[in-house]
Image (cartoon, coloured by chain):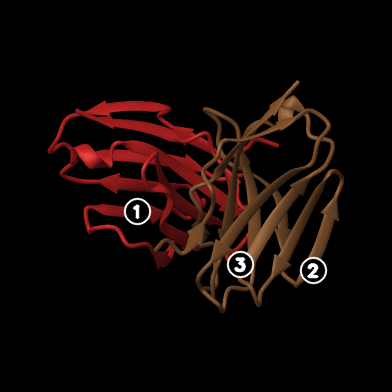
């Protein structure tokens, strides 16, 4: 079983809708969680980080964390075709430093 | 401000050869980490360097090695290449370990024939 699990998709949503991306993790001691966006042929780019239970909002993006359920999600409101990409969930687990464990990613397609 | 620079962008090697990849972090960043990305396994951590010292190492064989220089530039080396080493190798930098805001370079696409 992978330490960080994501549905590979593709997740298809119409333009203007809310896209909901989900991630589960196995290391109960994990403290830090990240969402990266990776366009095809490009490198990952950090879009959100979350450390505490609850919601964290940044523009059209909301990250949600539930440590009891070992669940992280990313909501994208008013989805745009430019949001079409692979979204990677990552955690640093209980380790110090920049040793991140990534999920396999969810491919999001936003249709005009 | 220049981003993370990785060279070369593409590389083709044959089995048994060795390869060296280079990474120049963002100016002022002293932590460099390396990741391997493949369609099957996704992004996997290789190693992390800070102040010329390896801080963490992922679950890869000893054929994978790296180092960091005093100017924070880093290199990784893969010896005795295998077909399964074909991947995108990504370098990421941050100010320090634990910063956790990683900035990734464009990567080196390695093909082993």
Q: Are marks 1 and 3 on the same chain?
A: yes
Residue holding disc 2: A54
Residue B77: x, y in percent?
29, 46
Callout 3: 10 Å neighbours few (<14), some, many (20+)?
A: some
Determine the residue located farthest toward the top in the rendered image: A112
Report which colour depicts chain B.
red
**Alpha carbon separation for disc pair 2 and 3:** 22 Å
Q: Which mark is residue B66?
A: 1
Q: Are marks 2 and 3 on the same chain?
A: no
Looking at the image, residue B62 sits to the left or right of residue A58; the answer is left
Give me the chain letter of mark 2.
A
Q: Secondary structure at mark 1?
A: strand
Closer to the eye: label 2 or 1? 2
Residue holding disc 3: B98
Q: Secondary structure at mark 2?
A: strand
Quarter of the figure with residue B88: top left
Determine the residue located farthest toward the left in the rendered image: B16
Q: Which of the two residues, A20 or B19, is positioned nearer the viewer here?
A: A20
Residue A29: x, y in percent?
56, 79
Above or below A62: residue B98: below
């Amino acid at each position: 079983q992978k330490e960080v699990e994501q549905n590979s998709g593709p997740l298809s949503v119409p333009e203007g809708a809310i896209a909901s991306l989900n991630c589960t993790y196995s290391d109960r001691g994990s403290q830090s969680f990240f969402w990266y966006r990776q366009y095809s042929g490009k490198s990952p780019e950090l879009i959100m980080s979350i450390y505490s239970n609850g919601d964290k909002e940044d523009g059209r993006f909301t990250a949600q964390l539930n440590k009891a359920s070992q669940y992280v999600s990313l909501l994208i409101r008013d989805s745009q075709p430019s949001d079409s990409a692979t979204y990677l969930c990552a955690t640093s687990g209980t380790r110090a430093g920049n040793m991140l464990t990534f999920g396999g990613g969810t491919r999001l397609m936003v249709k005009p | 401000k220049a981003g993370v620079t990785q060279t070369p962008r593409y590389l083709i090697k044959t089995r048994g050869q060795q390869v060296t990849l280079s990474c120049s972090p963002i100016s002022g960043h002293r932590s460099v980490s390396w990741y391997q990305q493949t369609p099957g396994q996704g992004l996997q951590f290789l190693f992390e360097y800070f102040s010329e010292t390896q801080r963490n190492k992922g679950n890869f064989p000893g054929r994978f090695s790296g180092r960091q220089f005093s100017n924070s530039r880093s290199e990784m080396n893969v010896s005795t290449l295998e077909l399964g080493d074909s991947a995108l190798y990504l370098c990421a930098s941050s100010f320090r370990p634990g910063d956790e805001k990683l900035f990734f370079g464009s990567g080196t696409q390695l093909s082993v024939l």
